[in-house]
Amino acid sequence: MPDKIPNVIAIEDLISRVAAKAKATSTALPPAATAEDVAEAEAALGFALPSLLASLYREVANGGFGPDYQLLPLVGAGRTALSEYRSERSASAEDETPYWPAGVLPILDWGCAMYAAVDCLSETATVLLFEPNAMTDDGAAAWFVDAGSLAEWLETWLAGTGWYREDADEYEDVAEPTPWETAASRIAE
């Protein structure tokens, strides 16, 4: 039990720092999602959100913060993480080359059909980059690991050291996304 206390404190600190940056960098954050909103989204998705992601939506805002194009709202009118997940899963199922695995929730639209997505079925809530322009006849070729965990991904944003920064190529310590080795098996599930 003592091992869990620092993690809880670290997560609370991370959420607090994310909230502070969100408020400082956004002119108008949407209201936070309610616990009922999160529960309804999880029921519609058929899987639970990682606790950190659920906390971000409940305690910071229902999207509208984060790197560049900012997190999609979880629920609500218009484009949401829930609607994009349903859309991508449906399109993938109808495509000759399936490409979207179950349990991978798009949370941010980078533009050009690229997404940041959280693997909600992984223990660490791995953050993935979906880059369809890399896809040929293998849907797995479009998937890259952006960060080993959602917490790491948020820390990168807070530190301003993400690959997506305009001047990222000027720094040696910026980690580039790497191929997601389990993409093919996850897509086939």
Image (cartoon, rainbow, N blue to C red):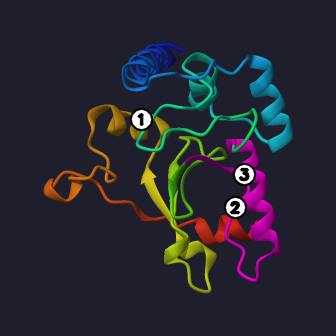
Q: Nearer the viewer, residue 143 or 67?
A: 67
Q: Which residue is mark 3?
A: 85
Q: Which residues are magenta?
A: 80-108
User: Residue at the spot x=51%, y=18% of the render?
Assistant: 4
Alpha-carbon span between mark 3 and mark 2: 10 Å
Find numbered disc 3 in the image and state the secondary structure of the residue it sits on.
Answer: helix
**Residue at the spot x=61%, y=81% of the render?**
138
User: The residue under label 3 is which amino acid type?
Assistant: Tyr
Amino acid type, mark 1: Leu
Q: Is residue 177 magenta?
A: no
C-alpha separation, residue under disc 1 versus residue under disc 3? 21 Å
**In the image, which is nearer the foreground, mark 3 or mark 2?**
3
Q: Are marks 3 and 2 in contact (CB under 8 Å)?
A: no
* Mark nearer the N terminus (1 vs 3): 3
Of circles 1 and 3, the one toward us is 3
Kind of residue at disc 2: Pro
Residue carrying label 2 = 101
Q: Earlier in the sequence, mark 3 or mark 2?
A: 3
Q: Is residue 130 above or below residue 124?
A: below
Disc nearer the start of the sequence (1/2): 2
Q: Tell me the residue that label 1 is attached to.
A: 154
Dots 1 and 2: beta carbons under 8 Å? no
| Residue 141, image x, y percentages | 53, 75
Residue 12 located left or right of residue 139: left
Tag 1–tag 3 contact (CB < 8 Å): no
Tell me if mark 2 has few (under 14), some (14-19) or many (20+) residues whose alpha carbon lies within 10 angstroms of its own: many
Mark 2 lies on a secondary structure that is loop
Q: Please name whichever residue, 105 or 75, is drawn nearer the observer in this view of the structure.
A: 75
User: Could you tell me residue 3's position as x and y percent?
Assistant: 46, 19
Q: Residue at x 66, y 69 (%)?
A: 185
Q: Is residue 92 magenta?
A: yes
* Dot 1: element: helix
